[in-house]
Amino acid sequence: MSTLNYSSYARANPSISEEELRTQAGQIFREESAAARRRGVDVAWYAPSDVNINRKRGQKAIRPNTVYLGEHGVASPSWADPAFDLNEKERVNRQISRIQADGGVITESQMTEFDLAPYIGDFWKNAAQNFYADMEGLSPQKVAAGGIIQSDENAAVNVINVLQEMIGQDRREYALLANAARTIATPNLTLSVDTFQGLNAYSNVGEGVEVDQQKGAITRQNFILQKDVGSIGITDEARMTADRPLWEIHMDAVTRAMANIKNVRIQAALESAAVTGSASSALWTAYTGEHSTVNPVAQIMVIGDTVYGNQGRANTIVSGTAAFSAFLGNTFIQGTQGGTVSREVGPNVITNIPGLPGFTWIVDPLMTPGRITVYDKNSLLLLEGPKRTAQVRKDGAGIDVYFTKDWNNVAILDASHFRNLTAVA
Amino acid sequence: MPAPTVAIEVPGSYMARSTLGQVNKVAATALAKGVLVELNTTNDNFQLATAAAPAAGTYYVTNKAALAADTKVAVVKKGPVCVVATGAIGPHNPVARSTTVAGRVSEAAAGSAGVCGKYIGKANGNEHDGQVLTAAADGESIWIDLNGGTN
């Protein structure tokens, strides 16, 4: 608490002198402290109607048939001011009886007047008025009806218990995006890829024969990057009313949606019409007697040879879950390798494939079930172009808008480096 | 495997470039979010667009619900906003108040007086990503480019 500087306050307020200020402050302090002490008293002192005591010089006369607060010494109240006048109370009671005897009705305002009449002075009248207001439910602290508290009676204050986690959010791994393609940084929106068509040399040339010259050819194909855009917007009010961080949740969602576009783009490329070549495939789950009918490794190796013949190196396999499970359950795999690799549900990248050392098998439930694609990873390009993000504040409308842009594309460099096996599972 | 679940925009959704405002509302009638409202020139209040043939007027779309006791209602006055279609609406075709369901829109003849916007996309907001826009079906939530009506 700061100390009041009477002099400076009086100078700042010329209408009141410093002396008056001190006097008024002292009076307020005495009244407040006296009132506080009176509230703390727990003894009432009654002056009988036929007793006339303590008429000491300089003291106020004790009013007979009156209640005082506190007792000081013997037969003397602590406070000179009386609190409750029993004469007045008796007068009020008589008046009430008279009204009732005449068949009259006591109004609300009359009852308030009668209730407060015996109290002496504003201090005790106010205290009594507040007390009656509490009793009648007129004060902020109201009295409710009785009964057992039941769960459906206080719905307004029910505790809302919200699970911290939120379901429905995309939490998948993008195995294809991370592993299935060779990533090429592409600062320009167009990536040109040149292809050389080779030449042959002559063999078994006859003596004295001059051979003709041979030449190859170079062709160029262009891949154009596509623009993916994610955008979210939120009003100030929406931020202020939710008990979830809406903006952050949506930022996360839009980021994942952008990644999902690329993941799906890779899946579409791997299953596109360009990837048509297929070896004769058969169901890997078929049995002949006690063993599997088809040897998956043999089928995959036929494809691998085809890719090799097209200047590629088959090193990657992608499939859905069913095809890989059929592979692992095939007796040519189990029987020769004595077991299977362990894997988890969902996207997987397996490198220690039984019977296929050097291959990486990417399992993604996004792929068409029952089909595998064997290819040279170097021939599948993920063209990663420029990225731009911006957050725009429309202050007039109170809206924040976020844009994220990603230029990218997936390119099949040489479709002959891809081969399928369909309906293996 | 299905694609990630994408939320369908609810009627009354709008874009950052849409123009918003609050207008006087007809008394004693609640208005839902995402309905077409029209200006009643008799009492100068906006009311739920009546199910009737297109007519010249001022048409907005509510972006918040309003209680019967409310005197104002928040609306999108111009720009992209999500509403509900009645009947089939061809891609990019003009729309006007529905002839059969109050508060919705239906396809209107080009150049007719009551045109209040154009059908620009499905409710999942993919009209900008190069997808071919197909016709809207009856009861489908769609994006229209609201022009505010012809008055």
Image (cartoon, rainbow, N blue to C red):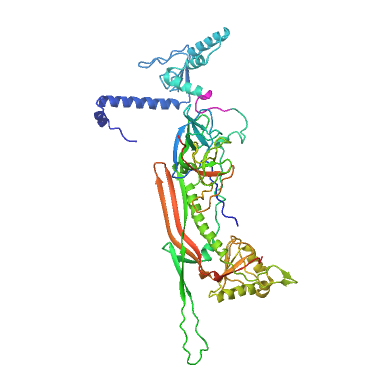
Residue at far bottom of view:
A207
Numbered range of the magenta stretch: A134-144
Does residue A224 lie above or below B140 as drawn?
below
Residues A207 and A113: in front is: A207
Q: Is residue A339 left or right of residue A131?
A: right
Would residue B69 be seen by someone viewing this image from the given angle?
yes
Image coords of residue A210 (percent x, y): 46, 88
Pick the front one: A45 or A181 = A181
View extreme (right): residue: A289
Above or below, A53 relative to A187: above
Q: Quadrant of residue A322?
A: bottom right
Q: Residue at x 35, y 16 (%)?
A: A58
Q: Quadrant of the C terminus of chain A?
A: bottom right
Within the magenta stretch, is there residue A143?
yes
Question: Residue A12's x, y, as percent?
Answer: 25, 30
Above-or-below relation of B146 to A348: above
Q: Split into 4 quadrants, where in the image is the N terminus of chain A?
A: top left
- Say if residue A175 shows up in the picture: no
Camera-side residue: A335 or A393? A393
Magenta stretch contains residue A334: no
Magenta stretch, main secondary structure, is loop
The mark total stands at 0
Of residues A19 and A211, which is closer to you in this image? A211
Q: Position of residue A172 (x, y in %)?
A: 55, 57
Please state the horizontal and vertical placement of residue A23, each as a whole percent of the image: 30, 24
Residue shown at 54%/63% (left/top)? A269
